[in-house]
Image (spheres, rainbow, N blue to C red):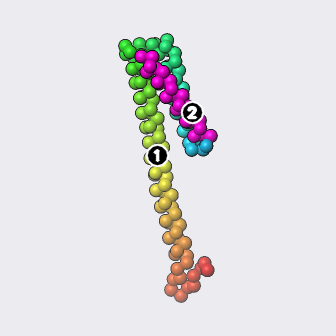
Amino acid sequence: MDRLLNFTTGLSLLLIVLVLVSVRRAHIRVEYSVSWLTASAAILALSRSRRLLDAFARALGIEDPPQALMLLAGCVFVVIFFRFSLIISKLKDDNIALAQRVAILEYRLQSLNTPHEGQEARIP
């Protein structure tokens, strides 16, 4: 059981370091890093505090505290992934709307450049 908790501690510390390095290098935006840092800190706290982990496991009705920790980690990451799916979906919709607006502007620009019967082009 201690090996699993030590492994979980190592992974959470690694994730915290990776997120902080990514923020520093501007690979991830700060508002997205908060979710990862919060999740990692919660998992780190539970993996290091045996009393807190036991209380959490009892509250869930799970006999083995490390299993409760793994359940929490899985649930937290599913929620984070869902949040990012919502963000990606919104960005995709925004990109489609932006492409449509650009197409409309290009059409209007071309219609200004195309001379109609008896007219010269308006833009040289």
Question: Which is nearer the N-term, disc 1 or disc 2?
Answer: 2
User: Would residue 63 appear left or right of 87 to someone viewing this image?
Assistant: left
Secondary structure of the residue carrying tag 1 is helix
**Residue at position x 45%, y 13% from top?**
54
Q: Main secondary structure of the magenta part?
A: helix
Q: Position of residue 70 (x, y in %)?
A: 41, 24
Is disc 1 surrounded by few (<14), some (14 to 19) or many (20+) residues within 10 Å? few
Q: CA distance from mark 1 to mark 2?
A: 25 Å
User: Residue lying furthest bottom in this view?
Assistant: 118
**Residue at position x 59%, y 38% from top?**
21
Q: Which amino acid is tagged 1?
A: Ile
Residue 90 appears in the picture as rendered: yes
Q: Name the image quarter holding the C terminus.
A: bottom right
Q: Quadrant of residue 26?
A: top right
Q: Front-most of 18 and 3? A: 3
User: Which is more foreground, mark 1 or mark 2?
Assistant: 2
| Dot label at residue 47 | none
Secondary structure of the residue carrying tag 2 is helix
Is disc 2 surrounded by few (<14), some (14 to 19) or many (20+) residues within 10 Å? few
Q: Which amino acid is tagged 2?
A: Val
Q: Which residue is mark 1?
A: 88
Q: Front-most of 52 and 18? A: 18
**Residue at position x 49%, y 65% from top?**
103
Q: Which residue is mark 2?
A: 17
Q: Position of residue 39 (x, y in %)?
A: 51, 29
In the figure, 106 relative to 23: above or below? below
Q: Position of residue 72 (x, y in %)?
A: 43, 24
Residue 13 is covered by the magenta coloring: yes
Q: Front-most of 76 and 64? A: 64
Residue 31 appears in the picture as rendered: no
Q: Name the image quarter holding the N terminus.
A: top left
Q: Position of residue 120 (x, y in %)?
A: 57, 85
